[in-house]
Image (cartoon, helix red, strand yellow):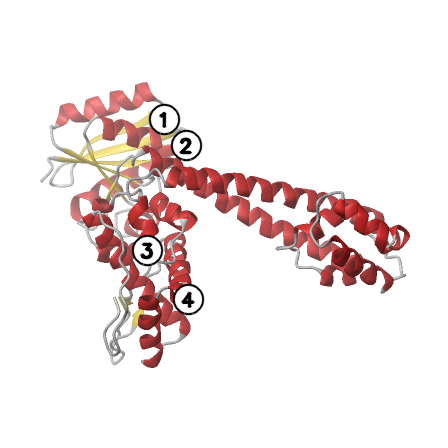
Amino acid sequence: MPELWAGVDAGKTHHHCTVINTDGTKVLSRRVANNEADLLELIGDVRELASDVLWAIDLNAGGGALLIALLVNHGQKLLYIPGRTVHHASGSYRGDGKSDAKDALVIADQARMRRDLHPVTTGDEIAVELRILTARRYDLAADRTRAINRLRAQLLEYFPALERAFDYSKSKAALVLLTGYQTPAALRECGQDQLASWLRGRKVRNSAAVAATTVKAAQAQFTTIPGVATAAAMVARLAKGMMALDEEIAETDTLIEGRFRRHRHAAAVLSMPGIGPLLGAEFIALTGGDMTVFGSADRLAGVAGLAPVPKDSGRVQDNLRRPHRYNRRLLRMFYLSAQVATRWCPTSKAFYDRKRREGKTHKQATLALARRRLSVLWALIRDNRTFQASTPQPGAVAA
């Protein structure tokens, strides 16, 4: 058992560190700047108090990254306590006020009492790079979705026929079209043949069909809506922005796949049906690529929201619900891969069908399959082997 527990309430510019002993008595409390020299001085002072110190922090990235790296490099044991956990726990401590010093004390005391907290590591270089790249791709995808919604809303205001004509989330040809022509009058003046030629010059596939669809939409509206010039300019800008986003997403996908395939667990992860380079990279990024941090497949399932928790009360028994706190991106990764696997993997399809016969809904059956696949993936990584598909036997339980 450690001799001291050091809790750190991390911030952008400063951290607050509180150290307690086995009785919960405070032996050190200090506000320290978030720079290397001051943090090294803090680590040295705490280590002088005792040789065995267990540190805990409420950030595992961002402003706490430098301190985490320094603690790991100096061989210090470190736990992660989510800020939400600290917030709920602080209500059981004396005083209604909130301060960095109190939060640091709560973090240290929780580390002293609890045995279910995650150890923190810096992660291998590839896992860290994948975390950065996948986070960026997640933001780009969200930006693209917002741009599509804004584009469609703007078109709907002055040219509803063209808004209905294409699926702008999938059609690159429609985006190219909007960079040059946005109004019914301009499209009618251009004409179908000239528009098809203009699209061919920009390497648009099926340019004749796109031109015909567009001109047909233009022939359906002769009324000019107020503000059409400004709205058309905005649509052109949004279309160009979406094309730029598509290029950046493609470049990011290439970077993600290149780094993921160099990871030591890439072969095991990719061998699982339904998991490609992007979902595999998401898994490595969100878990750090180190399964020992979680301890067991059950613990990882809890983090991913795939391990239901009981919500029993009185006569209501065996009432299982998804936990409130879990990693939604990790759940999304396993859920999407399970959906794909039901189409291409006979073993996964047999398991899914059995759950449906048991009365489960599509979502429940897919989540059950995702939970089973998590255990399989855990075993593959643990044993350093790849998935070998087997033909399910009638009446057998699929793995």
Most foreground residue, 110 or 230:
230
Q: Amino acid at mark 3?
A: Met
Disc 3 secondary structure class: loop
Q: How many marks?
A: 4
Spatial CA span between label 3 and label 4 = 13 Å
Most foreground residue, 224 or 85:
224
Most foreground residue, 131 or 19:
131
- Give the residue number, with chain letter if any, for mark 1: 34
- Give the residue number, with chain letter if any, for mark 3: 272
Q: Which mark is residue 343?
A: 4
Spatial CA span between label 1 and label 2 = 7 Å
Residue 106 in sight from this viewpoint: yes
Name, please, the residue furthest toward the top: 37
Question: Is 130 on the left-hand or right-hand side of 1?
Answer: right
Instruction: Choose mark 4 or mark 2, whichever is in front.
Output: 4
Residue 374: x and y in percent read 29, 58
Q: As displayed, is residue 369 above or below residue 91?
A: below
Spatial CA span between label 4 and label 2 = 46 Å
Upstream in sequence: badge 4 or badge 2: 2
Spatial CA span between label 2 and label 3 = 40 Å
Residue 216: x and y in percent read 82, 62
Residue 139: x and y in percent read 51, 45
Q: Which mark is residue 12?
A: 2
Residue at x 75% of width, y 49% of height:
177
Crowd tier of the residue under label 4, counting other residues whose Cα lies within 10 Å: few below 14, some 14–19, many 20 or above: few
Upstream in sequence: badge 2 or badge 3: 2
Q: Amino acid at mark 1?
A: Asn
Spatial CA span between label 3 and label 1 = 42 Å
